[in-house]
């Protein structure tokens, strides 16, 4: 089916107020992407799908006052909240604008690095976004991207629940579900040379079952939850929290999430020979 970028943005707009507030999920993955991107002082960075600043904030700190970071997101709510965060932190080298990842309103060749953390697999046309990232980069510029590659096996129950409850949805999902999204062919077909790729996992802990349920509503998972009738939603909640409770340890409820990080390069201009 065809997916609408504005509708996807609206889902995240409704999640914006609590996005990444239960556990620092996106913040940790975003900070790791910045580390792997090896940003330098003075770099100009474009952060596509900036959300609440998981990548933008550490990138702005890394490039320093002589650098600049522009974050773009299609969600009005995300943009407003991130702009307030930038102002609160006094990040004079950072800014955010509402923009479509598949049609970036930036000058060609104006950035040293383009970053996208946990975004490309959610877009209607990820290949169009990759083409735009390449256009925005100067020759020899780097693209840093990450996508989730799965939670630990003890979360298989969630996949089963969504498989069982999916047919009960009142309408089609507003965003694509791509559980095995592969960045390699996407970057290669977009004209990038992959320099480095690494899969890593991170551990998170929820203090209790209610925290997990709050987290489920605070990101893209809510796209499915919003499609269930009140009775079906309550049934899913009950079944999910029973499973979640069974995972509890003395420290809380663990979540192990893995992600693929890739650093790629836009080919430099050929050296002229005279």
Image (tube, helix red, strand yellow):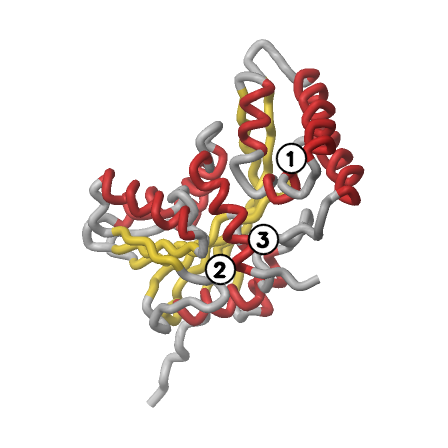
State left or right for residue 228 relative to residue 14: right
Label 2 and label 3: CA atoms lie apart by: 20 Å
Give me the residue at 47% from left, 46% from top. Answer: 13
Where's residue 143, x and y in %?
45, 59
Q: Look at the image and tell me whether residue 211 can be seen.
A: yes
The residue furthest front is 230
Where's residue 31, x and y in %?
41, 40
Residue on which disc 1 sits: 151
Q: Quick one: label 3, few (<14), some, or many (20+) residues within 10 Å? A: some
Where's residue 173, x and y in %?
67, 50
Give me the residue at 57% from left, 17% from top. Answer: 208
* Quadrant position of the C terminus in the picture: bottom left
Label 1 and label 2: CA atoms lie apart by: 25 Å
| Secondary structure of the residue carrying numbered label 2 | strand
| Secondary structure of the residue carrying numbered label 1 | strand
- Earlier in the chain: of badge 1 and badge 2, it is 1
- Foreground tag (2 vs 3): 3
Give me the residue at 55% from left, 13% from top. Answer: 251
The residue furthest top is 250
Give me the residue at 59% from left, 69% from top. Answer: 189
The residue nearer to you, when weighing 14 against 161, is 14
Q: Quick one: label 1, few (<14), some, or many (20+) residues within 10 Å? A: some
Residue on which disc 3 sits: 122
Residue on which disc 2 sits: 264
Q: Is residue 81 above or below residue 46?
A: above
Q: Look at the image and tell me whether residue 153 can be seen.
A: no
Q: Is residue 172 above or below residue 84?
A: below
Label 3 and label 1: CA atoms lie apart by: 17 Å
């Amino acid at each position: 089916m065809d997916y609408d970028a504005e509708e996807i943005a609206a889902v995240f707009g409704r999640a914006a107020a609590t996005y990444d507030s239960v556990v620092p999920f996106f913040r940790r993955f975003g900070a790791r992407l910045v580390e792997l991107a090896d940003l330098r002082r003075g770099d100009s960075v474009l952060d596509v799908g900036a959300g609440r600043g998981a990548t933008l904030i550490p990138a702005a700190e890394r490039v320093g006052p002589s650098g600049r970071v522009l974050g773009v997101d299609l969600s009005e709510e995300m943009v407003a909240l991130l702009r307030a965060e930038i102002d609160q932190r006094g990040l004079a080298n950072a800014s955010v604008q509402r923009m479509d990842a598949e049609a970036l309103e930036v000058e060609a060749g104006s950035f040293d690095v383009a970053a996208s953390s946990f975004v490309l697999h959610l877009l209607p046309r990820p290949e169009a976004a990759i083409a735009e990232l390449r256009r925005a980069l100067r020759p020899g510029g780097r693209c840093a991207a990450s996508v989730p590659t799965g939670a630990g096996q003890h979360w298989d129950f969630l996949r089963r629940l969504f498989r069982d409850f999916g047919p009960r949805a009142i309408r089609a999902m507003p965003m694509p579900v791509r559980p095995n999204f592969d960045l390699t062919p996407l970057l290669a077909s977009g004209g990038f040379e992959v320099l480095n790729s690494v899969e890593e996992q991170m551990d998170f802990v929820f203090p209790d079952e209610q925290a997990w349920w709050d987290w489920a509503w605070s990101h893209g998972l809510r796209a499915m939850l919003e499609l269930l009738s009140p009775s079906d939603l309550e049934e899913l909640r009950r079944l999910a929290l029973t499973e979640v409770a069974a995972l509890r340890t003395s420290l809380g409820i663990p979540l192990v999430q893995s992600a693929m990080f890739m650093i790629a390069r836009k080919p430099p201009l050929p050296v002229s020979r005279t």
